[in-house]
Image (cartoon, rainbow, N blue to C red):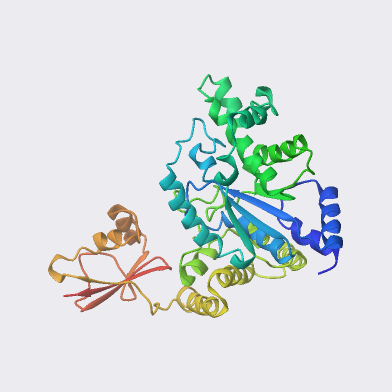
Amino acid sequence: MNNLDDKMKIIMKGVDDLIDEKDLKEKLIKSEKEGKPLVVKLGLDPSAPDIHLGHTVVLRKMRQLQDLGHQIVIIIGDFTGKIGDPTGKSKARKALSTEQVLANAKTYEEQIFKVLDKERTIVRFNSEWLAKLNFEDVINLAATITVARMLEREDFKKRYEGQMPISVHEFFYPLMQAYDSIAIKADIELGGTDQRFNLLMGRSLQKEFDMESQIVIMMPLLEGLDGVEKMSKSLGNYIGIDEEAGLMYQKSMEIPDELIIKYYNLVTDVHPDEVEKIKSQLDNDEVNPRDIKMRLAKEIVTLYHGEEAANQAEDRFKSVFQKGQIPSDILTVEVAKESLDIAAVVVENGLVQSKSEVRRLVSQGGVKINGEKATDLNNIPDEAELVIQIGKKKFIKLVLN
């Protein structure tokens, strides 16, 4: 791809902020002229290794830059992880042990290559250079920034104004991760909007070291399936990249209509021109949002499971959730007939959260047994197998013995 405007269009897809566009264009032109790829940095602090779709927003942008021919460098913060990133924290984050950091880092490496091309990705640990700094180096590093500048950081500012303790070593986190940009001579660094202070610190530190400042690309945070809160496993509003294809497709269909375009921009590789066409179709009511969402679901599943699995997931969704058929891969459990407690079984298997919720769903007509609406869970068909359906999407087969 030789068109600078098209390259910029792909790079800018879904971006919240870029500092700055003019410098980036100059770097891209120079890179192509010299035949030398830009060094693109992403720092990962290995404190929570489970990756969901929200975490892939930055990784997806890295993959797009990788496909444009640039060198991706993932920096695992095994050294900085022992301090803990204070971003967004109202108190100091607990430091991780070396063993925890390395275990988390291994999990990270396994998961990031579901997005990035492993053969074209360099993974480095920042202990390579940070562990070698002597105390004089550290003092010189600390001399590049004032306390006043540190207190511009929102979390530090709040803690300072609230008279909550801030340990001196916490000030070193943004400096140390900024030093990573010095060590690898980063041309571009990516991160979420919540990492703004850290990312800009890398730019300013490079100037102190008489280096060309890196470009900063900030990606927005992704709302989860509730359409309100940031995607999070603890909130249950997430799509996991390790989830099986059918579940991933089904969850993708729960994305709120108003977030369809945001998901296209942030978690797929669909070209920005095509996304604009889709947006125009939605804005002008030319298509049913459900059909656009089905295409989105298929795009997402294809990225992590391949086209064949995505087609199967789509067929399953159509038969189960659109035509009301019972899935062939239904969860099956054996239950003793004499001690059968349907409410307990569906709660134990995670279909609903409590027995009281099961009773409420029954009273509202939201539970079927062998295709018939259940009105009393104590009055059930005398059959060897019972297919319990909760709402439109949840099934479980009970084999009575």
The quarter in which the N terminus is drawn is bottom right
Residue toward you, 225 or 188:
188
Q: Is residue 51 visible?
A: no
Residue toward you, 143 or 368:
143
Residue 175 picture quarter: top right
Work out whether 267 lies above or below 234: below
Residue toward you, 200 or 243:
200
Q: Is residue 131 visible?
A: yes
Residue 116 picture quarter: bottom right
Residue 100 place in picture, x, y as percent? 42, 47
Residue 157 picture quarter: top right
Q: Residue sitting at 54 percent across and 64 percent down?
A: 252
Residue 181 place in picture, x, y as percent? 68, 45
Residue 126 place in picture, x, y as percent? 58, 46
Q: Which residue is the extreme one toward the left?
A: 338
Work out whether 123 lies above or below 201: below
Residue toward you, 12 or 367:
12
Q: Residue sitting at 84 percent across and 61 percent down?
A: 34
In this picture, residue 306 sits left or right of residue 97 = right
Q: How many marks?
A: 0
The quarter in which the C terminus is drawn is bottom left
Residue 120 place in picture, x, y as percent? 64, 65
Work out whether 32 lies above or below 216: below
In this picture, residue 316 sits left or right of residue 383 = right
